[in-house]
Image (cartoon, grey):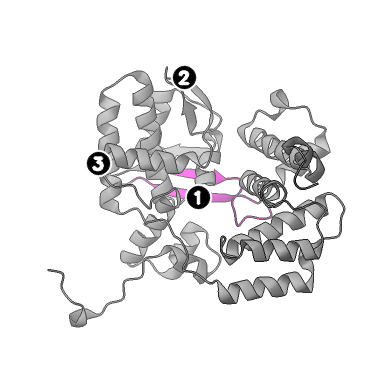
Amino acid sequence: MRAGDSSQSRREHCGLDSIGLCCRIIHRIHSGNVRDSVKVNEPEHYRQAARRQSTARRYAQVIEHFEVAWGGMLPATQGSVVHYLAAQAERFSPGTLRTHLAALAYWHQQHGFVDPTKAFEVREVLRGIQALHTRPPQQAEPLQLQELEACVEALRQEEQAGERAARLRACRDRLLLLLGFWRALRSDELCRLRIEHIQLDRGRGLKLFLASSKTDRAYQGRQLNMPALVRLCPVQAYEDWLACSGLTQGLLLRGIDRWGHLHAGLHSYSVSRVLRRAFERARLNAEGYSGHSLRRGFATWASANQWSAKALMDYVGWRDVQSAMRYIEADAAFGTWRRKSA
């Protein structure tokens, strides 16, 4: 079942159709359209909701890569998993390969097969790849405050001119950038914010309820506070967006068509596009920036403004210092030893 099988038979064999359905159901659950979009029984509805949409989508991509791109077969043996890791060792980082193993493990557990990824040989090969192919982490550039200010100014100008669709999009994007930066939100967290979970105290601040997040495995939710600021204020941007869009409930950030009609909520991968488009409007170079730039930019700003590690971790929601350090731009004080730039 390697060379001659059609893509459809491969998908049926490895369960890609069921995993793809999982992705679609989860998206519809989070967007509030599950009842109208797909008919599922109640246990299935809640089982799919337990898996984050981004995780389900990533796992589906891994399964497709394993069988369709590489030519593997599912259920897999520990030998095939070992050969898969060795074949991908120079292409993917060890961290990415761990995600691939997690996806394969989940597929086997989901379908009632023995999980080959837990085998000693598999773990030893992964350790060897880690030893021989360690590489510097690839990180998004942190968004600097002056860059944020330039983007917001360009968006404000667009809000004052242009057609309805352009004005709506600029108003939405301004809110996305300011709220994403000052609350250091992940892209998927931004896109899941709901108006009914936000309390506005005009001129003073916002209280946001984040129903789930990457580190909230128990789905307990988290209450976030956002004070009004003297400039680049996300609270004012929130008020402006509600007034401009007319929204009163549902997902906060919506897709907008060419005629200015609001549609379903934004996907998390749209955040990077919004940021890059704002850079283009401000005539800035967007290379190296992504949705993570908002979160990393705030962490860098807070560190430069003397926030303690504990205060920053509590505000952003990090559980350990190592997570925080990945986002902060270190700038050790070398004093008079630092060479002045010409």
Q: Which residue is mark 3?
A: 283
**Discs 2, 3 touching: Cβ within 8 Å:** no
Relative side of 48 to 335, left or right: right
> Would residue 41 be seen by someone viewing this image from the given angle?
yes
- Kindly identify the amino acid type of the residue bearing the numbered disc 2: His
Disc on res. 261? 2
The image quadrant where one finds the C terminus is bottom left
Figure quadrant of residue 81: bottom right
Of callouts 2 and 1, the N-terminal one: 1
Q: Nearer the viewer, residue 40 or 236?
A: 40
Neighbourhood count class around disc 3 (C-alpha, 10 Å): few under 14, some 14–19, many 20 upward: few
- Kindly identify the amino acid type of the residue bearing the numbered disc 1: Arg
Helix, strand, or loop for circle 3? loop
Nearer to us: label 1 or label 3: 3
Q: Which residue is mark 1?
A: 186
Helix, strand, or loop for circle 1? loop
Give the image location of residue 252, x and y in percent.
Answer: 50, 33
Looking at the image, the residue that sits furthest to the front is 4
Neighbourhood count class around disc 1 (C-alpha, 10 Å): few under 14, some 14–19, many 20 upward: many
Give the number of marks.
Answer: 3
Looking at the rendering, the stretch of residues picked out in magenta corresponds to 205-228
Give the image location of residue 9, x and y in percent.
Answer: 79, 38
Q: Nearer the viewer, residue 8 or 232?
A: 8
Give the image location of residue 90, x and y in percent.
Answer: 56, 65
Figure quadrant of residue 13: top right
As for residue 223 lying within the magenta part, the answer is yes
- Kindly identify the amino acid type of the residue bearing the numbered disc 3: Arg
Q: CA distance from mark 2 to mark 1?
A: 26 Å
Relative side of 204 to 111, left or right: left
